Amino acid sequence: MPKGIHPGALSARIAKGAFKPNIYLTNMSMAYFQNADRYAAKNLFPICPVQLASARYYIFDKASLLRDNAQRKPEFGKVTPAQMGQLDQSYSCKVDQIIVGIDQISTLNFQRIGVPGAADPRRAKIRFIAEQMNLHQDRIFAESFFKSGVWSNEWTGGTAYSTSGKTFIKFTDDNCDPVRLFDDLCTEIEQSTGRRPNRLGLGKNTYNALKNHPGVVERVKFGGSTANPATVNERVLAELFGLEKVVVLSAIYNKAGLGEAEDMDFICDANAAILAYATSAPAIDEPSAGYIFTWDMLGDGQYMPVLQYEGENGTHSEFIEGLFSADMKKTGDDLAVFLKDCV
């Protein structure tokens, strides 16, 4: 019932046609918003807040740090000073934007009848903006980190395992040994960098194949009971492969343009995977395969702010905008391996 209107007066207004009752349900709607945990960009590589849109950061030479530079001191003399190499690299954050409009005249009807929930235009469009920014962030992640050609260490799924040819047996083949494969890849990176990979990102089809692989199921099935049957999930795979975290990249998006027939697909390659070492937070004495540099462009501590503002006089409109500013950058090429055609 409209706020401040007597039931009798409301009935009279309806009878005269002066008021049209709300014919939409206010306790449900059909909206294909995705669960926030499906967006995985922030779960693999750390976010590094920055105060400037672009700047540089130090890179200390790996060869110098890991070389034994100590020498035997000559009698009455001294050794040659050790060399510690230092380089730098840059990042650059650009600003992306999305805007949706609200017609204040049509919105007035919803305000007068006190419609809650899904029918509130402002609430629905703010949720739309937030969803769009998360989707956009994952798409940039896919282009920056999760595709063939990004990482120099890239393996391809096939019918045989070859370290020299960088091929492995697809996870849909029972002859594949996933545990051995990830052990070998982790050891290779650890030997080269001194860091054992701690994170694994899996495309949806790759995850499904690993979850149902006989070699994986066999290793975990005896850990279950009737009350708590053995289940293969991200946590179990992380423990099995000796990793800190396994993330399934399952967010989807519509690849079609406006006015075209919808074309739904996973944002990240469903048949791929990435194994990497990354820190949980920015560090000055730790390497990381990648970083997400985020710029606080408005000075309010947010790199994905949502704002609302009035339209021009006479338009009786208002707008909601979302801003996004980040540079997703590969910072340690030797700390990751990309696997394509896993299934």
Image (cartoon, rainbow, N blue to C red):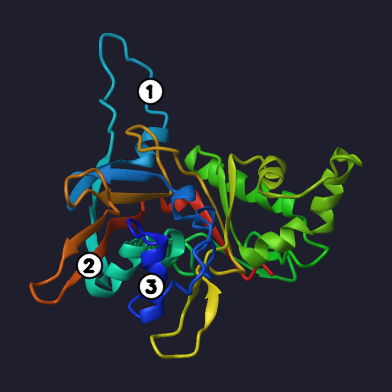
Residue occupying image coordinates x 74% and y 56%: 211
Q: Is residue 132 something that shows in the picture?
A: no
Compare residues 267 and 116 and report the one nearer the observer: 116
On the image, numbered disc 1 is attached to which residue? Answer: 70
Q: Secondary structure at mark 2?
A: strand
- Mark 2 vs 1: CB contact within 8 A: no
Which quarter of the rendering shows the N terminus?
bottom left
Tell whether 129 sits left or right of 302. right
Compare residues 155 and 299 and report the one nearer the observer: 299
On the image, numbered disc 3 is attached to which residue? Answer: 12
Q: How many marks?
A: 3
- Mark 1 vs 3: CB contact within 8 A: no
Q: Nearer the viewer, mark 3 or mark 2?
A: 3
Crowd band around label 1 with a 10 angstrom C-alpha radius: few (<14), some (14–19), many (20+)? few
Label 1, label 3: how far apart the Cα atoms are: 95 Å
Crowd band around label 3 with a 10 angstrom C-alpha radius: few (<14), some (14–19), many (20+)? few
Which quarter of the rendering shows the C terminus?
bottom right
Compare residues 40 and 239 and report the one nearer the observer: 40
Q: Amino acid at mark 2?
A: Phe
Crowd band around label 2 with a 10 angstrom C-alpha radius: few (<14), some (14–19), many (20+)? some
Q: Amino acid at mark 3?
A: Ala
Q: Position of residue 100 (x, y in %)?
A: 28, 71
The image's mark for residue 319 is 2
Q: Secondary structure at mark 3?
A: helix
Vertical placement of 195 versus 17: above or below? above
Q: Nearer the viewer, mark 1 or mark 3?
A: 3
Q: Amino acid at mark 1?
A: Ala
